Each structure stands twice: as structure tokens, then as C-alpha cells.
Image (spheres, grey):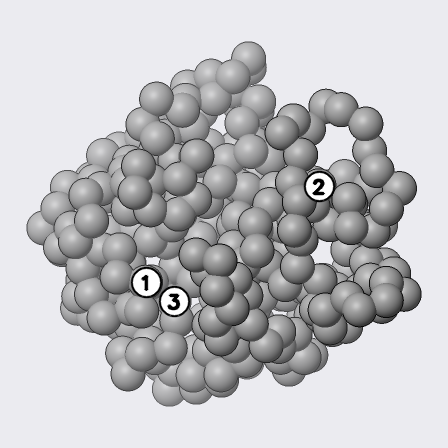
Amino acid sequence: MKVVFSSKQMKHDPVHFLSSGAPEPNPEVPERADRLLKAAQNSGLDWVEPSDYGLDPAAAVHTPEYLFFLQNIHRRWGYIEGASEEVIPNIHPDRRDGSYPASAVGQAGYHMLDTACPISADTWGSALISLHSAVHGAHLLMEGEASCYALARPPGHHAARDFAAGFCYLNNAAAAAQSLRTEFDRVAILDVDVHHGNGTQEIFYHRPDVLTVSIHADPVRFYPFFWGHADERGVGPGLGYNLNLPLPRGTDDAGYFTALSVALARIEAFAPQAIVVALGLDAHEHDPFQGLAVSTRGFGQIAARIKQIGLPTLMVQEGGYLSKDLGDNLSSFLEGFMA
């Protein structure tokens, strides 16, 4: 198996984000990638660099308005007297179908869903290359690889068609799934991050060709709060092609495996030709976000059960934050899949 990653993804390194109104150190740091890359290589994966795919795969899942914003907002923000070094919004619209502001402050509020997606000078470049890593993994599957791990950093599953959120700017898993659609009629996305992948859901919510399934901590009291509930099933042609499996806080391996059985049964009923796993490792019992309590060994068992479906599988890194177990959790998943 190969790990796809570029060291250029490390340049994105915001200093802080706002949590409960207070500035906190940003937990989505380059050291995450260092640890994950080392773990992947220690598990026997070969490191390859992504090709440059330009804007095409990003434009396939994001609006041109949003992409233009991401490319230019940090420069524009710098023209504001007294503004913060990093772009963090202080106002948000109450609807998305109203007028579009010309102001950089207004556009930041429109395109940045929360205060946990600060934009620095290097955010756009790192985010685009992160997306290229996921798309490169998709191309490897289309060229005949059985599986691949894309070390996508910054992550992507909270990014929707026209907004950033939760440390995510471009939706790597969605871009990979869209790329796979050029070869496969049906693609399934299984999100195992502790947080619901609201951006991925939004991108495919109207579509029957990409099934989105998410297992996550119940958003009634956990980020992203407004999405990820069990009654969200899709709309229009996409009705019945989205499955959310929210779990109580602190759910351990046994409870998680029960939900995983439901998820995999739905995926098998969809009969996809390929699977994208949005691989969040923050469901671990010692992750700083403390949403679920999956063990290190449990990640290996999750991977082994996904592998039993027997389809080309792309693993795209999502969350999983600094703890002594982060590398071991990835190794457990990868080795469980390769066993």
C-alpha cells in the first residue's frame, strides 16, 4: 500500500482558533502529519508525492465563488487596519440565499462557518495540495491499486461546497469520491471521524450516485451540532442515500462495532464499486476531543471489517489529534486492513 503526502501540506500552521469565545492553541498542527507519516512508513507503506491536478478536482465539489475567496482572502484581510494576522470571522449570515457582501469581513463570515478554521498565508496552498493527495490516491485505485492511504492535512470533511469549518477548507474525501466517479458508477463514503462530516454530507445530499455514511458522536451536544442527526436522509434524488449513525458520548468498541455493522450493511446494499473511508482517528479513547472511546486495537478491527467488503478502498485522513496514541492508532488501522 502507498501513502500519498507532500511536505508542502505542512506550511499551513495557524497559531490559534476560538473555542467557547476564548483563543486556544490550534490543535490541527503539522506535527500531526509528522507522526502519521512515520506511522504509515513503519507499517510498511511506500511514500509517494501527489501529482499537480490544478483546480479541476476542487472545482468539481466547491463553488467558484468560494475558491476565489480562499485564494485571495488572506491578502485582502491584510489591507484592513488593525485586523488579526489570521482570518477569523466575527459575523455570520442567518441564511445563504441572500445578498453576497463585497467586504472581506462579510465574505469571511459567509464562507467560514465557525471560528475553528483560521486562514493564514499558507492555508490555500496547503489545502489544495492536501486535496491533490486524496485525488492522487483515487487515481491509484483507478489504475488498479487495491487500497491507498492519503495523508490529507489539513483535513476536509467539514468543508462544504461554499464554506470552511472545523479545521477544514477543501473537502478532500469528496474530491476523491468525485474523481472515482469517472471510473465507477457508484462510490460510497464511510466517515469514521468522531465528528459528523457535515461538509461531505452537504456536497452529496442531493445525489444518488455517492452514498454518504457517518458514524460519530451525537451532535445534540457535540460539534458540529446542527448536522449529523439520524433523520437526515438526503433530499430529492438523494433521498435515502445518506445515513447518519450518531452515538452517545463515550461509546466504546462494542457499541461502535454495532453501528459499524449497520453502516457496512447499508454500503453493501448500495453495491458500490469503490469506497472512500474518511479516516478520523479522534474517536479514540485518549483523543483530546473525548467524544468516543474506541481503543487502539478497535481501529484495527474496524479496518478488518471494512476490508471484508472486498472493494477498492481509499483512506483519506481526517481528524485525530496529538496524543501518545495517535501513531499507534493509524498503524492499527492500516495493519488491520492489510492483514
Q: Quadrant location of the N terminus?
A: bottom left
Mark 1 Cα shell of 10 Å, populated few (<14), some (14-19), many (≥20): some
Q: Nearer the viewer, mark 2 or mark 3?
A: 2
Q: Nearer the viewer, mark 1 or mark 2?
A: 2
Three-letter amino acid code at disc 3?
Gly
Q: Nearer the viewer, residue 211 or 14?
A: 14
Left or right, residue 332 beside residue 126: left
What secondary structure is marked by label 2? Answer: helix
Three-letter amino acid code at disc 1?
Phe
Q: Earlier in the sequence, mark 1 or mark 2?
A: 2
- The location of residue 198, given as percent across then percent down, is 49, 40
- The location of residue 32, given as percent across then percent down, is 46, 78
Which dot marks residue 22?
none
User: Outermost residue, front direction?
Assistant: 82
User: Outermost residue, left direction?
Assistant: 254
Q: CA distance from mark 2 to mark 3?
A: 27 Å
- The location of residue 295, given as percent across then percent down, is 17, 66
Q: Nearer the viewer, residue 199 or 314?
A: 199
Q: CA distance from mark 3 to mark 1?
A: 9 Å
Q: CA distance from mark 1 to mark 2?
A: 26 Å
Three-letter amino acid code at disc 2?
Tyr
Residue pointed to by mark 3? 320
Is residue 304 in view?
Answer: no
Left or right, residue 231 beside residue 115: left
Q: Quadrant location of the C terminus?
A: bottom left
Q: Earlier in the sequence, mark 2 or mark 3?
A: 2
Mark 3 Cα shell of 10 Å, populated few (<14), some (14-19), many (≥20): many
